Image: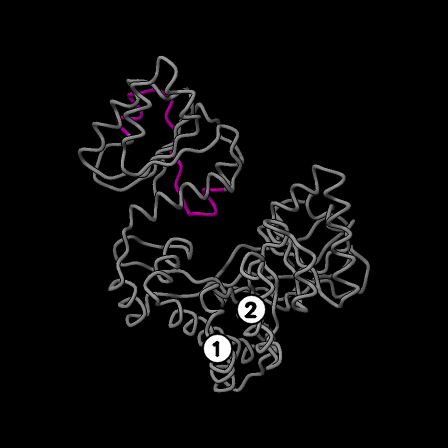
Amino acid sequence: MLTVVSESLGRSKVLTDVARELSLILSYFRDVETLDRLMTGSSRRFVILGDADITNEVVDSLVRAKRNAEFGLVVCANPDVLRSSNRARASKTLAAYPIVEWVDPDHDADLLSAALRKCRRRMLKLGKGELERALVNREFFLQYQPKVERTGGTDWGTEWETREVEALIRWRHPEHGLLGPLEFLPEAEAFELIGPISEFVLFETANQVNRWAEQDLDFNVCINLASSQLNNPLLAHNYKRIVKKQGLECNRFTFEVTEQDIANSEAPHLLVLNEMRELGFRISLDDFGAAVASLGTFEQLPFDEIKIHASALKRAQENEVAKQVLAAVTGLAHNLGISVCAEGVEDPETYRFLSAISCDKLQGYLISEAVMPDIIKKVYSSSGTEVDVA
């Protein structure tokens, strides 16, 4: 989707990272004339403004554009400060726009991405019928992001191998184009369609595991498990039935649950997760360190893996105390027989940092983005401080 961005924000890495994540096409403007030109036409688009762009001239340009097309607006400014300044009129007009998100001027990629996703969801206005038709018409498909792990013991500068991939659902919408999971799964949960969609994902991944085997590729698969599914007492046995029907063992599949989903140790869904483990499925604690980060979760449920969230990695790289805490958590996990995977690994600096805390597995753009199943590579190699596709 075309995204019109003010030059006042700079052509930052935050913007390029978000554009890559959300498949956005960035076009920049530095004056109202260029903004007018970029906003011409009836196509849907995003607009990202900085504090310096909250002027009557820019706002009037957007008012004109609104007559022809709907757009999502993200404003990187403090609305309270604007309301008490001589730009109150422009601020009030922007605040009244039906699809607008405000983010802190010092935002990071996560905040900007979340704001754009909220805008896009409000623009899409997906209905239950669309989701039901998507299932029937097979508009959903899966991409897979590799997770690599060391194959040469404890030596960090060694060969890495793809033994596992994470299945990520996409929707090829007939009108809106390619949609990511965060743009339709909340609606799927609201319409109580997450169950059929989750079964579709498991069935497709099981089929793909068999197709890979025909090519002499031996991959296990990770699947994200929606929190609402954890209240289904039949979930474990239903999933076992699907897997066994494809001639596979349950231990080929790891289900990822977020830490916030199990924060209550008395919640009934912990029984569901324990039952899944008893049947052979593996359980991964996703987004570790992004929320409550309670070590008590290890006691509640013996996870097979924890995935360190990218934000926790960033904090640990910038703060010595956070680094020591993360190293201690990694050591504790290893002592309990739990593997540790770092997600969001995007640069050599993060890769080198992970060597200091003996992380077992890596996942992120430095390794590979999510790709179609026929181009997954099996082996990666490293040379001390870099990871290169073999």
- Foreground mark, 2 or 1, reads 1
Q: CA distance from mark 2 to mark 1?
A: 16 Å
- Residues shaded magenta: 18-37
Q: Residue at x 53, y 69 (%)?
A: 269
User: Which of the pair 8/226 is nearer the observer?
Assistant: 226
The three-letter amino acid code for the residue at tag 2 is: Phe
Give the residue type that dot 1 points to.
Pro
**Does 31 appear in magenta?**
yes
The residue lying toward the viewer, choosing from 48 and 32, is 48
User: Which residue position is annotated with label 1?
Assistant: 233
- Determine which of the numbered discs, if any, sits on residue 273 in the image: none
Q: Is residue 243 above or below residue 348?
A: below
- Residue 146: % across, % down: 58, 62
Please state, as top left, top right, bottom left or bottom right, where the N terminus lies in the image.
top left
**Rendering quarter of residue 362:** bottom right
- Disc 2 target residue: 255
Q: Relative to 55, is 109 above or below? A: below
Q: Is 303 positioned to the left or the right of 373 in the image?
A: right
Say which quarter of the image contains residue 288. Answer: bottom right
Residue 30 position within the rendered picture, expressed as x and y whole percent measured from the top left: 38, 22
Q: Secondary structure at mark 1?
A: loop
- Find out whether residue 216 is within the magenta segment: no
Rendered residue at 27%/37% (across/down): 98
Label 2 residue SS: strand
